[in-house]
Amino acid sequence: MSRTAEDALVPPDPERVDPGVLVALLARHGWRRRGGAPGRYTLDAPGEPESAARTSLLVPERRTAGARYADHTELLGEALDALARCGEPSAREVLTALAVPGDEIRWHRERPPAAGAAVPWTAAEQLRGAARAMLVSAARAERDRFGYFGARHTGHADAFLEQVLVGHAPGHQLTAYVPVPEGRRTVTTLLRALQATRDAVDYQRTTGGMEAFDAAVGLGVCHELADSLIRMVRGTEGVVVALAWAPAAGPPAGFATVPEPVEFSPGDLPALEAASDRYVREEPSVDVRVTGTVTRLRRPRPSGGGTIRLRVLVGADVRHVRVRLPEEGYRIAAQAHLVGLPVRLSGRLERRTGFRHLTHPSAPAPVHVDEADRDRLMKALHGGVDTFEDSFGG
């Protein structure tokens, strides 16, 4: 998660805001209706009485044929301006949710009591890093199901994170806003995977067996998800992950309107650690036949074999692989690099290195292309694996 929600402090265009969504978001973040005129507007204020005395919002009701009136947009604009100036922490979250009409994922860590309300720097970094790793694991599992991903589907996960906004909350909390419909499949994958992890941990703690973790791979549970939970729970008294659907879109089919938060505690760490190790240990290495462009060459002496780095175009769900080649293969790869041709070779993508190294390689073979194909190749480098497959017939 690299983007923040600072821009959300700028009130959105009232013409683009659904008053019903605004009221739903206010209610979600603790605001309560304290008056109004039925059919015309509501008067909403923060849940705390002392806050209500300082801040209240007059929000016109949803725009319908019978409810709209001349100053409807003006009243809504005034409400949004007041929300942007409001000092309540929840006001920022409501504005962020309006800026990114999507689903919310909220992490809350219960920390041991400490002096003052400040959050230790390392604790804040730990929460943010673990939350990012959790989202990455869900984005990968939305594409495929593996017990251990390593470097697989990294590009897809990075593209997903580019869509996500990060909100700020006091204490040991963090909120991510995921746009709908673009990111909904990843959010639903995450929710199913967290629920399956919770069930598998309970089963392991009750019976001592790990079978439930094996079955949970089909629901998106993996080494990366277990590892993110370990990082999030360690050093706390517990962690709660809560999801809320975008008010404008509603819940997806088959899911509760208000999903039950998923909780983990330090007592779950032994089961999570055993599962994390098990997923890495049991995920096999993979035989592949990859096509890629040579982006780096290195050998310790002017002659002999060396190591090349390939940017993978097709054949494996990773961005780059390193390959150790004998002298003849290294010479062919260097020649292909000089003339701008991709190479094709077979080998075994090693699980032990996170699927970043190709062992037992065949001799690289240049893939000859004409000028038109070379142009398509350059576009494929930016367009991803599917583009290259389409351009060169798979």
Image (cartoon, rainbow, N blue to C red):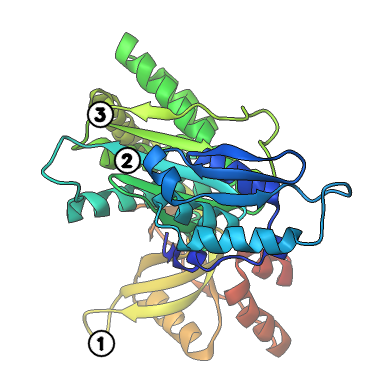
**243 relative position to 170: left or right:** right
**Residue at label 2?**
227
Along the line of sight, the residue nearer the viewer: 14 or 277? 14
Most extreme residue toward the right is: 65
Q: Earlier in the sequence, mark 2 or mark 1?
A: 2
Most extreme residue toward the left is: 115
Query: Is residue 80 placed above or below 107 in the rendered structure?
Result: below
Find residue 256 and report its image quarter. Answer: top right
What is the spatial separation of the Cα atoms under label 2 and label 3, in whole angstroms? 10 Å
Element at label 1: loop
What is the spatial separation of the Cα atoms under label 2 and label 1, in whole angstroms? 43 Å
Q: Which mark is residue 269?
A: 3
Whole-percent x, y for residue 88 in the image: 41, 52
Q: Amino acid at mark 1?
A: Pro
Query: Is residue 202 placed above or below 242 in the rendered structure?
Result: above
Element at label 2: helix
Decide if residue 78 is in sight here.
yes
Q: Residue at image x 48%, y 61%?
A: 158
Q: Earlier in the sequence, mark 2 or mark 3?
A: 2
Q: Residues within 10 Å of mark 3 (few under 14, many from 20)?
A: some
Q: Is the Cβ of the residue at disc 3 closer than 8 Å to that at disc 1?
A: no
Along the line of sight, the residue nearer the viewer: 116 or 260? 116
Query: Is residue 164 placed above or below 212 in the rendered structure?
Result: below
Name the mark nearer the viewer: 3 or 1.
Answer: 3
- Say which quadrant the N terminus sits in: bottom left
**Residue at label 1?**
302
Q: Earlier in the sequence, mark 3 or mark 1?
A: 3
**27 relative position to 389: left or right:** left
Find residue 252 and report its image quarter. Answer: top right
